[in-house]
């Protein structure tokens, strides 16, 4: 689907209402709720569940239990590296548990007019009951970029560094954007990629024209 974010007009669509597994573009809703209910300077301590409930080999930035990032740094981890432990930490920060946050995500999607979306986690790791459609993703993406355009400051970055608190003091690590379109497609400023073996390759892309 191709949508004008300003007006919501659909310029092109094909099978846009077909249910699909969204992989990490799930995190668009995670980010939206974090921005709606949080403050960027708030500090988030990573719990055992946030760190260790993700699948081995899935996307992460190696945050350890008990380490602390600000919400802004968590969003960097989600947007640039699609870090699953960061999505989990954001969920616990907003709603106290990952389960309650997933319910919140689904309810918020319905408020936006999403017709065929159900979330069971904040990160997009596979579950047969975790699905959405291209049309619904467009609605979530539009809500995010029109109400929180500052998110494009994160999604358009190619590389950055985060300094965070560890048990030993502070540590730095680099991030590289998973979305190669920001370097190869004219005007691209985001937004989010995702992939799993069953979802295949997924993307919600945003480009600016005539500004």
Image (spheres, grey):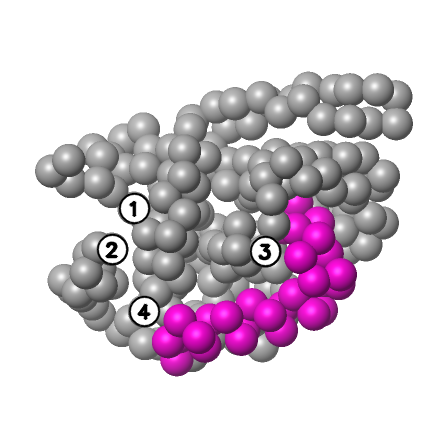
Q: Nearer the viewer, residue 37 or 25?
A: 37
Indicate which disc, 3 or 2, sits on the residue closer to the N terminus. 2
Q: Residues within 10 Å of mark 1 (few under 14, many from 20)?
A: many
Residue 98 magenta-highlighted: yes
Q: CA distance from mark 1 to mark 3?
A: 24 Å
Region in magenta: 86-115
Q: Quadrant of the N terminus?
A: bottom left
Is 83 left or right of 50, judged from the image as shown? left
Element assignment for label 4: helix
Q: Are marks 3 and 2 in contact (CB under 8 Å)?
A: no
Q: CA distance from mark 4 to mark 1?
A: 14 Å
Q: Quadrant of the C terminus?
A: top left
Q: Are marks 4 and 1 in contact (CB under 8 Å)?
A: no
Q: Nearer the viewer, residue 130 or 27?
A: 27
Q: CA distance from mark 3 to mark 2?
A: 23 Å
Asked whether residue 131 is in view, the answer is: no
Query: To which quarter of the image does residue 183 belong?
Result: top left
| Foreground label between 2 and 4 | 2
Element assignment for label 2: loop
User: Can you tell which mark lies on residue 206?
Assistant: 1
User: Can you tell which mark lies on residue 135?
Assistant: 4
Residue 190's spot in the image, x, y percent? Answer: 36, 41
Residue at the image position 53 percent from the left and 75 percent from the top: 107
Which residue is denoted by mark 2 in the rendering?
5
In the image, is residue 92 above or below residue 153? below
Q: Main secondary structure of the magenta part?
A: helix
Indicate which disc, 4 or 1, sits on the residue closer to the N terminus. 4
Residue at the image position 79 percent from the left and 42 percent from the top: 45
User: Can you tell which mark lies on residue 37?
Assistant: 3
Which residue is the extreme one toward the right? 167
């Amino acid at each position: 689907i191709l949508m004008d974010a300003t007006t919501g007009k659909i310029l092109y669509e094909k099978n846009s209402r077909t249910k699909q597994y969204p992989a990490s573009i799930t995190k668009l809703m995670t980010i939206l709720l974090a921005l709606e209910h949080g403050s960027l300077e708030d500090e988030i301590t990573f719990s055992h569940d946030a760190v260790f409930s993700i699948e081995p080999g899935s996307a992460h930035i190696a945050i350890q239990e008990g380490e602390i990032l600000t919400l802004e740094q968590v969003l960097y981890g989600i947007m640039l590296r699609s870090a699953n432990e960061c999505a989990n930490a954001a969920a616990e920060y907003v709603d106290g548990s990952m389960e309650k946050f997933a319910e919140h995500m689904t309810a918020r999607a319905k408020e936006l007019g999403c017709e065929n979306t159900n979330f069971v986690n904040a990160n997009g790791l596979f579950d047969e009951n975790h699905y959405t459609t291209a049309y619904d993703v467009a609605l979530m993406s539009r809500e995010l970029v029109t109400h929180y355009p500052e998110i494009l400051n994160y999604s358009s970055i190619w590389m950055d560094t985060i300094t965070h608190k560890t048990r030993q003091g502070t540590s730095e690590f680099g991030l590289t954007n998973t979305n190669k379109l920001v370097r190869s497609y004219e005007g691209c400023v985001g937004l989010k990629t995702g992939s799993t073996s069953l979802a295949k390759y997924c993307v919600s892309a945003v480009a600016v024209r005539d500004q």
